[in-house]
Structure formats: structure tokens, C-alpha cells
Amino acid sequence: MTELVTFGETSLRLSPVGEERLETAEDVRMRVSGTESNVAVAASAMGADATWLSKLPDSPLGRRVQRTLHAHGVDTAISWAEAGRQGLQFAEQAPTPRADRLVQDRDRAAAASVTPGELPMDRIQRADATFVAGSTLSLSGDIVETAEAVLRAAGNGLVAMDLDFQPGLWSVEAARETLDGVFDAVDVLIANEDQAREIFDRTDEPRQFAHAIASKRSFDTVVITRSGRGALVCSDGVIHEQDGIEVDAVDPAGQHEAFTGAFLERVLSGAGASEALTYGVASATLARTIPGSMTTASREEVESLAADLDGGR
């Protein structure tokens, strides 16, 4: 079984019930949500041996995060902090013409103080693949240097990064400066189309800018996800595309991470870029029909939909 190690900060996501506004809601749902932990959950559902590394407050809220990941089959290696707090997100899902809202409350989160010495770096060095998201590097504190240390320690395996640019956490200029310093350690870059356009300042078609980004930054693989419109991958200079399919979307949160987890699991299992892309789109499609940002789609469901997608080409 292949091992995927992910490292980053995970928040508790609080959402009003139904389509209520944050400022008037009396009842909220609390779920665990973090890019790296969501990816680990999706990869684990596909059969990978997934582990999430981080630092959490030694509190009921921190333990809620760990317990949820264990329930989804993800192993954890956690440094427990006596100080620091649990990061929070407040998400409002709204019907058109209202816009969805996401309020970030992650300052002074315990994860921001994590150092390389608090992580099992030997495990990272032995892993088949390591994954970090750009949103983790947006946090102030020791976590930025630690994330870079994780990426560089993982040089013996596949190193993957999600651009994961979240404007509520940092500016475009700050993101570009920080990410430029770690891109040389990354083999596989995964990005949402809109985020890639903003960070790399691209106005051309996704096929063109995916190839341009891969060539300029020397990535082996660049993946561009396009929400319900599917995704494409540029691998070794060759472009593969997979259209999406329309579904009755329940919650779009987590679709990108579901794609990433399935895509990486297939790559680690020896699949080609085209097959991995199809499985990623299938996983993302199913995730849109599931409440919350952690997918509960099974491997069998993903395989079945991937076969339908592949047959529709």
C-alpha cells in the first residue's frame, strides 16, 4: 500500500443550517475542514495509506479534529500544544444572487507554531508522496519554514502542492513571493483555474497556461481543476482533458480536495495521467453531492463513475 503524508493546518468549519446568514443564524453545523486533511481523507477512501501531520491545541476542539480524521481512516502524527487556539472558518452557503461567504479566523492557531523538530521528519523522508497546500504557507509563524522543510525533506518521493490561494488569508503579492521560494521542490502542482490565473497572472486558455507554467517552473505535472467543467493535466508536456458532468450539487466545498486525493492515489498506484485525471474528476463530482468538505464517496463509487466518464469520451 502506498503512503501519502500530508502536512498543514486544519480548521473547524461552522456553517448556518440551510441558507441562513451568518449574522442571523441561531443554529450552526460544525465540521472539520483543511485542505491537506481533506486530501488525506479522499486518498484514504481510494485505498491509500494516508497520514496527516500537524499541531493541534490540547483541547476538546483539537481532539475533535483528530477524532474526525481517525473516523475517516486517516492516521495522524500530532504535536499537542498547551498554548494556541483551534483555527475556525465560518461559511455561509447562499443561493443566487447572493454570494457564498467565508470568514477566516485562523490567527494564532496552534499549527502556526509547529517546528520541524515536532514532526516525524523520518516518516516524511520515507513516504511515497508528500502533500502541502499553499494556504498553510499563508499563516504567520514557524509553520512557513516548517512547510518548506517538509517539502524539501520529501525529495525521495513525489512532492505535490496545491496552490490553494485563499484571498482572506493573504494578498496575491505575498502569495507569489512565498510560493516562488518553494516551487523548485515541487513535482506536481494542482490548482483551481481561477486561482492559477490570479497567482500566475494568466489570461490565456487553461491548456496554454498549464503548459507554460509547467515549462517555466519545471514542474513534472500541472493539474488545473475547473469545478463542474472537469479538469486537465499537463504531464511531461502532454495535455490530457476530462469534461465534468452536471449533478444536483449539494455542497461544492471539498470537491477540489476530493479530486486531489483521488488523483494522487491513482498516480501513486502507477496509473497514467489520463486515468488519474478521470478518477479525480469522478471523485470531485461525487463530492459535490455530499454535505461538508470531507468526501465520503467510496472507491467503488468513484471507480463506477470514472468508468462512465471514460466511456463518454
Image (cartoon, rainbow, N blue to C red):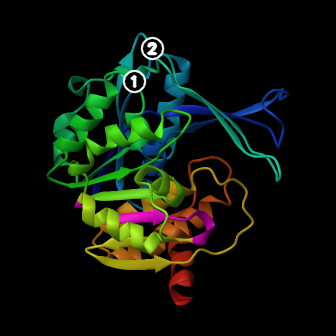
Query: Residue 210 lies in magenta, yes or no?
Result: no
Which residue is depicted at the point 33% across and 27% down? Answer: 143
Give the camera-side residue of 197 and 50: 197
Reading the image, the residue beneath label 1 is: 140
Q: What's the residue at 40%, 79% (across, down)?
A: 240
Badge 2 amino acid: Gly
Q: Amino acid at mark 1?
A: Ser
Against 120, residue 230 (above or below) is: below
**Circle 1 sits in a helix, a strand or a loop, which is it?**
loop
Whether residue 53 sits left or right of residue 154 in the image: it is right
Q: Residue at x 52, y 41 (%)?
A: 166
Label 2 neighbour load within 10 Å: few <14, some 14-19, many 20+ = some
Q: Nearer the viewer, residue 193 or 122?
A: 193
What is the secondary structure assignment of the residue under circle 2?
loop
Would residue 294 be seen by someone viewing this image from the given angle? yes
Query: Which residue position holds label 2?
Result: 84
Answer above or below: position of 191 versus 107: below
Q: Would residue 84 be found to the left or right of residue 146 on screen? A: right
Front residue of 76/32: it is 32
Decide which of tag 2 and tag 1 comes sooner along the chain. Answer: 2
Residue 93 drawn above or below residue 267:
above
Who's the residue at 26% across and 61% down the image?
216
- Residues in magenta, as a range: 218-229
Quadrant of the frame with the N terminus: bottom left
- Where's residue 86, x and y in %? 52, 22
Q: Which mark is residue 285?
A: none
Residue 137: % across, % down: 37, 35
